[in-house]
Amino acid sequence: MHPNVRVQVCVWPSFLQPISGPQTEEGEYYYRQLRGWAERKCRLGLWLYDLYAAQTPFDVSIRAMALNARTFRDLGSDYLLHDCGGARCWSNVPMATWCWMQLSWDPDRDYRELITDFCDHYYGAAGARMAEVFVGIEGRLETTGAVCKEEAYTTEFVAELKAKLQE
């Protein structure tokens, strides 16, 4: 390895909240690590595995991705390599992948507009309803500050989502 290259693994414990937002102690440690690298004024490249780690459609937040894209830009990241989970095709992985591509060009894009744009094109006639569901999920994550899906997706909330999809 070249002497100017340093690889460090920073464990980010939740993909439901932004790294600069409410987190566990481990999340605070991760954010401090990133800030420390940025303060060194070295070239900072990040390799993200958030979508690769997703096990269900509800493991990754588009809102958190948008806020993270801004944080990475503000920390002075020179580049991002985003591992998008290979061939997984759960309901929000294609959307999350597309949204991340858009955020890479412009981290200030509004996540609600990105979700709506994606859903309109991906789901066709059901696009508006799907966007409403996904934006509702993001609102729930923001409101609860949950860092694990068990905290965010209560039985009652999941029943509300199912009912919305049946309308």
Image (cartoon, helix red, strand yellow):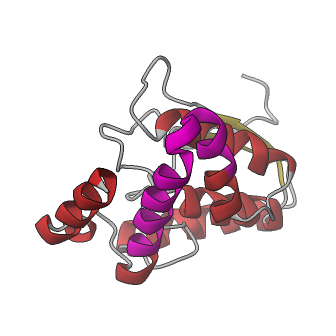
When asked about the image quadrant of residue 13, the answer is bottom left
Q: Residue at x 37, y 74 (%)?
A: 25
| Residue closest to the eye, 106 or 6 | 106
Report if residue 48 is visible in the image.
no
Q: Is residue 104 left or right of residue 88?
A: right
| Residue closest to the eye, 10 or 95 | 95
Exactly how many numbered labels are in the figure? 0
Report if residue 119 is visible in the image.
yes
Q: Is the residue 5 above or below the residue 166 in the image?
A: above
| Residue closest to the eye, 154 or 64 | 154
Q: Position of residue 55 (x, y in %)?
A: 30, 37
- Tell me which secondary structure the magenta stretch mostly adopts: helix
Would residue 15 be counted in the magenta stretch? no
Q: Residue at x 57, y 67 (%)?
A: 31
Q: Position of residue 141 (x, y in %)?
A: 40, 71
When asked about the image quadrant of residue 119, the answer is top right
| Residue closest to the eye, 29 or 152 | 152
Q: Which image quarter is the C terminus in?
A: bottom left
Q: Position of residue 101 (x, y in %)?
A: 74, 39
Q: Residue at x 50, y 63 (%)?
A: 135
Q: Is the residue 148 above or below the residue 52 in the image?
A: below
Q: Is residue 134 left or right of residue 64?
A: left
Q: Is the residue 165 above or below the residue 125 in the image?
A: below
Q: Residue furthest top?
A: 87
Would residue 137 be counted in the magenta stretch? yes
Q: Which image quarter is the N terminus in?
A: top right
Q: Residue furthest left?
A: 155
Q: Position of residue 148 (x, y in %)?
A: 28, 62
Q: Which residues are magenta?
A: 117-141
Q: Is the residue 29 above or below the residue 149 in the image?
A: below
